[in-house]
Amino acid sequence: MSGPNTDYDPVEVTPLHAEEVERTRDEALTAFTEAADLAALQEAKSTHLGDKSPIVLANREIGALPPQARKEAGQRIGAARKAINEGFASRLTVLEAEHEEQMLATERVDVTLPWHTPELGARHPLSLISEQVADVFTALGWDVAEGPEVEAEWLNFDALNFQPDHPARQMQDTFFVEPAGSGKVLRTHTSPVQARSMLSRKPPIYVICPGRVFRTDELDATHTPVFYQVEGLVVDEGITLAHLKGTLDHFVVSMFGEGLEARLRPNFFPFTEPSAEVDLKCFVCRGASVGNPDRPCRTCGSEGWIEWGGCGVVNPRVLQANGIDTDRYSGFAFGMGLERTLMFRNGVEDMRDMVEGDVRFSRQFGMEI
Amino acid sequence: MRVPLSWLREYVDVPAGVTGRDVGEKLIRAGLEVETVEESDLSGPLVVGKVLTFEDEPQKNGKTIRWCSLDIGKDEPQWVVCGANNFAVGDLVVVVLPGAVLPGGFAISARKTYGHVSNGMICSSQELGLGDDGTHGIVVLEPGEATPGDDAIELLALKDDVLDIAVTPDRGYCLSIRGVAREAATAYGVALKDPAELALDGSGAGGYPVRVDDAEACSVFVTRTVTGIDAKALSPRWMQKRLLASGMRPISIGVDVANYVMLELGQPIHTYDKARLSGEIVVRRANAGEKLMTLDDQTRELDIEDLLITDDSGAIGVAGVMGGASTEISEATADVVIEAAHFDPIVIARASRRHKLSSEASRRFEREVDPLLPRYAAQRVADLLREYAGGTILPEETVVDTHPLPDPVTLRADHAARVAGAPITLTETVRHLESVGCTVEAAAADATAAPLAAGVHAPVLAEVGTTTVGAANVQGDDLLTVTPPSWRPDLRDPNDFAEEAIRLFGFDNVPSVLPAAPGGQGLTVSQKRRRKVATALVGAGLTEVVSYPFTGEADFDAMGLPADDPRRTTVKLVNPISDEEPSMQTTLLATLLRTAERNVGRGATDLAIFQTGLVFLPKAETKPAPLPSVAHRPSDAEIQSLYDALPDQPLHVGVVLTGLLTPTGWWGKGRPAGWADAVQIARLISSAVGVEPVVTNVELAPWHPGRCAQFAIGGPDGKVVGHAGELHPKVCQAFGLPTRSSAVELDLEALIAAGPESITAHPFSSYPVAKEDVALIVAADVPAADVQAALAEGAGELLESVRLFDVYTGEQIGEGKKSLAFALRFRAPDRTLKENEVADARQAAVQVTVDRFNAVQRVG
Ligand SMILES: [Zn+2]
């Protein structure tokens, strides 16, 4: 710091001349503007804003002025310094942005490269479709009921009006549990879960029962000894065939799309009376392939309808065996094979793909069907 | 049941032009399962020709051909070459002309052969699709049967559609043309010409002597006798054709007629050579040790429950199933005794199953045959034998008939409408019931409704209207008394009748109404947790597979299970798919490892799979499951014993990891899946259901003895819920898996049950954390988890978390020792911890490990 200068006529202090201050300011601003990068800007900063810079030196001269001149000179220098600082700051912002941009550009990678954390696995489509069915019915307020796979013969057959020597009992090729006469079987359908529901709950009963079932069929392209079914059961006051149709229509729409419907064809099942087969309006051609050789449909074989399952009004004998008051209640039930559903819904051509556990089969589906 | 359309048309006036496909469609809507409709691929021209001339021309190959000229109703004769010689000049034959297609897609054109141009050919029975008529030559028509140029397709009914119907157990009557015709007549709204309506000329008594010892099992037994037949006579061509079209082979007139009548009426018939019968026919149960050689030349040991047809010589047939060889009719038979009987369905079903003999007869008897048929069917057989085998029908007839009349059933007039939820009018209901053969009457004033009419007290639907039955005006809640026809033994409950009315009303006409369930609670906790586990595993990169639950000793051996391992005690099947796999899985890995093996075999060596499924654990004491009455709900004790008889069947989850978990790539070498990944997946499953299990080292097959983690819940001595770790090298080898494959099996059901009911939130501190690291040297066999637990115990309430971050072994530490480094975090809920507080807590933590494991702090 230099002390007050009393030897000079204050008017003669050149650095404080207005023209001189403006020149100093303009030189600084020009230097900042011309600085090409952050390093050059820093150098210009020390030249034009550093301790030895003209504007700082000029500032020191103010003290030498007589008091009446100090205010004016101070304001002049102050304005110039502010302009220089601002010039520096704005150039700094620009150069920093440029610098960052360049740096990021050099860090560019190939985002298509693979990485080593495991990819998402996959659910088995039979699980996915079971869950989807469960969701359709829980949304209606139904419960999902379950039961064991080794089942009492009584629950698998007798409770469902399959009488011991009735041909219907022979129609289902049954795995029997040792010893012969144990009264135990591998359940041939999910219907024993219906019996269990009636034995354990009080009406109104609204249950959907997905599950694995067993019959002594050899594995081939369309048969498997182990397969999945889903059955529904309703027992309530005033339940009719019309309610069964309404439920199936809703189910069809939920699984296959708006505008589709179910069709019933009379048939025979021991646990329902009347009984019917359920056909599903073909969700691919919607019937347009029928009698139209120009538009054949693989999904329905140009029949317009796809066989889907069985259904009917619960035979009152079944209600009776399971302790439901047949004067008061009636019910309906329906059942479908899930493999078959996947076959026509998702284009699975060979039953064996569904049961062999080849991961490639599940992986096609991921977590959606 | 195969039904030729031409045969059906004999009894029903199906509108002209209607095809087999049309009829099939109608029958399907009426509830018959029409599986296929075979349409004939035959097309003409196929005409009747009269042999004008022929010349026998011996050929070099030893054959003699005939060069024939035929009158086919045109100006010029038709010249053809024929290989057969069973005809003479003037015979009427069937000639196929160029441009025609014979059955089997055999196209006919004029062709040069044996030095002539043959313009078509003379047809044999087989070429016309009529089967072997036994002539070994061409078909020669009866003189005057037709005139030259007539269309032979029409004449011989060659172009016929055949419906193949899978008859459901309740529709036994549809195992006959008569029954299907009845359905077709109803479907088309036309009259049925019932083939069973024929004149009986029997005297009702004095026929071949018969005694029925078991009237329950045999309620009707009718015999007729036809004498002096020509057993060598050929069945008429039309009969052979119908038998063939129905899937039966023509054999001889005696056999063919019996089969024909069975197909036509549905009544199985048995014929005996009267000369080979000795004494009275007795229908009785078998005696112990009795034997019979059946028509298929097999000697069968009879069961005392078998119902037999016997004579003085002993058994001559298993009733309703198969006849015996000793009384069979043959070419030498002159006098025939015809048997038409009614047997109890259950008796026949059991015998058929016992002898593994399902015959056309037993299939019908099992589904119950119209008990009024036997006399008519026997008459029909006798008539046909007289006509086509030249026999004489004896007027004497044996008729044993104790069959009860069908019981009438009383039901509400609007029952069908209420079951359907559709406005089926009472008038329609009565009409439909009558069209299936029921007799409908207004119930007597004191009649009560039959049981099992669901919702019997429901109000009447206004739309059903009223109707008149007899003299009575009937309202919806009035009762009707309905008597089923003799051929519908399945109609016994109100709903059975409702079904008939509804199917004829049309299922399509029933409205669609979605019922409103009371509010549900969605999936159960267990169901939701299973989904969470599956989702977590998929998130970790695992793929779900399914496997059959069947296993056997080979799988257990491959898993290295010791001889006394409880997992070798299984639930076994009487009739497994494979004798090598008679058991239900007791461990998911038994089947999942096979699935892994299959995948690895197909090239998927880097595998991460999981499966959920039941395992089947026999109870210490195995009891048979009872078979309570179905007339009412079983007692609570009976229900409990049903449940108790079953094996435990908990849901498990299994995982197999093989090969690399992360692949080799531009980031470096891949990382193999190992024991730690398996253990971590087991932890992942546990935390997905909110459970923190206790992990300990154990030795258990199929795992590596030093690399198996046991998972327990409810403390260190709690319930074991499964294991995870590296598989034993021998197990990897036995299942063809890469070495160091690993696996997990957990009792998912037990884990899920241990999950929290709900979670309560705890406040967490906003004061700063104090971090301390501790390195402890302990014996190598001290589990890290135990050291960590000791630290946590000693550190007290200020400890926020403790985490193992390094494990070190080496010279610096010393033989048999390891160094475990833990990061401890301390925090207080209400203040910033002071240095001495943290130091004290750290020291307290270390002290417990010192006391418990002789741990030594490692410094620097
Ligand atoms: Zn279609």
Image (cartoon, rainbow, N blue to C red):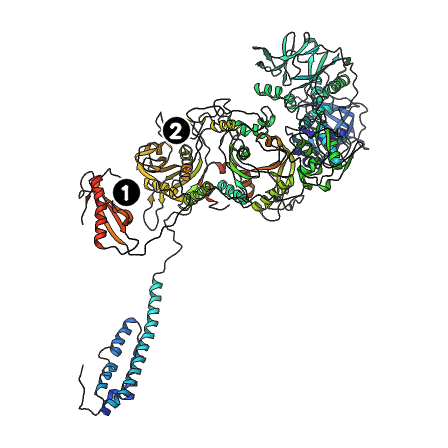
**Pick the front one: B58 or A215:** A215
Q: Determine which residue is flagged by label 2.
A: B567
Ligand 1 shows up in the quarter that is top right
User: Of the residues under marks 1 and 2, which one precedes in the sequence?
Assistant: 2
Q: Is residue A294 left or right of residue B525?
A: right
Amino acid at the residue labelled 1? Ala
Res. B794 image quadrant: top left
Q: Position of residue B724 (x, y in %)?
A: 35, 37
Q: In this view, does B45 lie to the left or right of B642?
A: right
In this view of the protein, can residue A15 be seen by the observer? Answer: yes
Q: Mark 2 lies on which chain?
A: B
Report, in whole angstroms, how far the alpha carbon at label 1 lies from the one at label 2: 33 Å
Amino acid at the residue labelled 2? Arg
Res. B434 image quadrant: top right
Depth check, mark 1 against mark 2: the one in front is 1
**Pick the front one: B167 or B831:** B831
Checking the image for residue B789, the label placed there is: 1
**On-image quarter of the N terminus of chain B:** top right
Q: Mark 1 lies on which chain?
A: B
Instruction: Mark 1: give few (<14), some (14-19) or many (20+) Cα within 10 Å.
Output: some
